[in-house]
Image (spheres, rainbow, N blue to C red):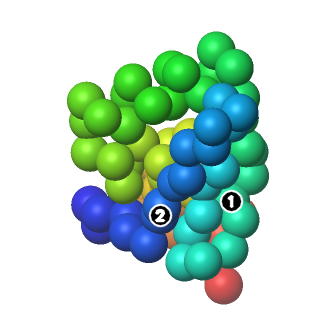
Amino acid sequence: MARPNGFAYEAHPDGTVHITHQGRSAPPSCGGDRAARFLTEVTTADPQLVMARWTGDYRRGNERTAQAHPRNRG
């Protein structure tokens, strides 16, 4: 599985967190309790994988299987 990279985050003093991917804003921005959960998770696990999962920008591992499905054949 390819490891995602290019993600970064900024924690602001007002309690919000903004995630970027290759310099572009990657929604969602979060604040409050959600930001606290994100910051806890990003410090305890692989930060790139955590940010990819929180933004929804990650592969699920079923792409190869989906290519063989009759609906997806050229």
Q: Quadrant of residue 26?
A: bottom right
Front-lying residue, 44 or 4: 44
In the displayed structure, 68 sits above or below 28; it is below
Q: Is residue 52 visible?
A: yes
Which residue in the protein does label 1 denote? 26
> Could you tell me residue 6's position as x and y percent?
44, 72
Dot 2 or dot 1: first in sequence order is: 2
Question: Residue flagged by tag 2: what amino acid is it?
Answer: Phe
Number of on-image labels: 2
Farthest residue to the front: give it: 13
Q: Is residue 61 left or right of residue 19?
A: left
Q: Residue at x 54, y 78 (%)?
A: 22
Give the residue at x 64% y 15%. 33
Q: Are marks 2 and 1 in contact (CB under 8 Å)?
A: yes
**Does residue 33 lie above or below 67 as drawn?**
above
Element type at mark 1: loop
Quadrant housing the C terminus: bottom right
Give the number of the disc on residue 7: 2
Residue plotted at (51% across, 20% down): 37
Residue type at numbered disc 1 = Ala
Residue 32 pos. (x, y %): 69, 20
Residue 25: x percent and y percent? 71, 65
Q: In the structure shown, which secondary structural element does the residue marked by tag 2 occupy? A: strand
Q: CA distance from mark 2 to mark 1?
A: 9 Å
Q: Position of residue 17 (x, y in %)?
A: 63, 42
Return the mark for residue 67: none
Name which residue lies at 25% across and 30% down: 44
